[in-house]
Amino acid sequence: MVQNSDDATAHSLSLPEARLRPPRARAQGLVHACLAVALAAFVALAYLASLRPYFPWDVAIAQALQSYQVAWFAALMRGLSWLGFAPQVIIISAAVVLLLLLAGYRWEGLVAAIAASGTMALNEAVKDLVRRPRPEPALVHVLRSLGSYSFPSGHVMFFIGFFGFLFFLALAILRPGWLRRLMLAFLGGLVLLIGPSRVYVGEHWPSDVLGAYLLGGIALWLAIRLYRSRRPRAETDRRLRGE
């Protein structure tokens, strides 16, 4: 009788888990499908970018964006691009990682550092493979000429890998409230606006930015997977929220 009671209890406890598995499995399947599509799209775009210095739609989109000559918008675009250059980007990322470490979030700080350095190393490796030249001043206004290759955008990949991971941490660490909404809006804005800013200053084509968003998104997913390999979802929520 005791054994049957235990079996019934175990069976009843397993029912909620059984109900939760299918939705989670479907969500994971959807994420994996999106990642596969993103990777395939990036490989195709990188191959085409290795054959052509730019696409016709690159010029059309860049010229249309640069035609919006409003003082505050131009300052915002230039400021965001400036933020992604050394030494300021190194100082910012190092300061954020140091703050995480001092606050006791050692694993979070380590993964943030890996996300920052890893995305940049991946960007340089792909740039050396594709070898696409920067936009030509004869076609668009170029704020300043850079000697490195163009595809994919290093600024965009770094912002997605580093600030995107901080977005994920803010979502997990901060309790619901105005501070959390403010941080999510700020970090999300950085990630969304860095792409247009690189086109606006004429240092990248839109296809460079698109490729960076695709590859950077995959790199961000890998960083989150690395983080959760040591901090499972439930443990992360309990630890970071102090519950």
Image (tube, rainbow, N blue to C red):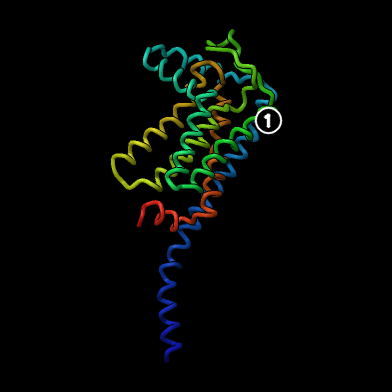
For the point 61% across and 35% down, the residue is 42
Residue 100 image position (x, y, % from top left): 45, 42
183, above or below 2, in the image: above
Task: Count up the numbered dots.
Answer: 1
Quadrant placement of the N terminus: bottom left
* Image quadrant occupied by the C terminus: bottom left
Residue closer to the observer: 62 or 124:
124
| Residue at (56, 47) in percent of width and height | 33
Residue 71 found in image quarter = top left
Is 91 in front, or is 132? 91
Q: Residues within 10 Å of mark 1 (few under 14, many from 20)?
A: few
- Tell me the element at label 1: helix
Q: Position of residue 240 (x, y in %)?
A: 40, 51
Would you place residue 131 above or below residue 8 in this image?
above
Return the residue found at the far top: 138
> Is the residue 218 above or below the residue 67 in the image?
below
State the image quarter where residue 179 is shown: top left
In x, y percent, where is residue 220?
Answer: 53, 41
Horizontal arrangement in the rendering, residue 45 relative to residue 69 (left or right): right
Q: Amino acid at mark 1?
A: Tyr
- The residue lying furthest to the left in this view is 178
Where is residue 138 drawn, in percent x and y?
59, 7
Most extreme residue toward the front, as rendered? 102
- Observer-nearest of 118 and 35: 118
Q: Residue at x 56, y 21 (%)?
A: 205
The residue that mark 1 highlights is 47
237 relative to 131 in the view: left or right = left
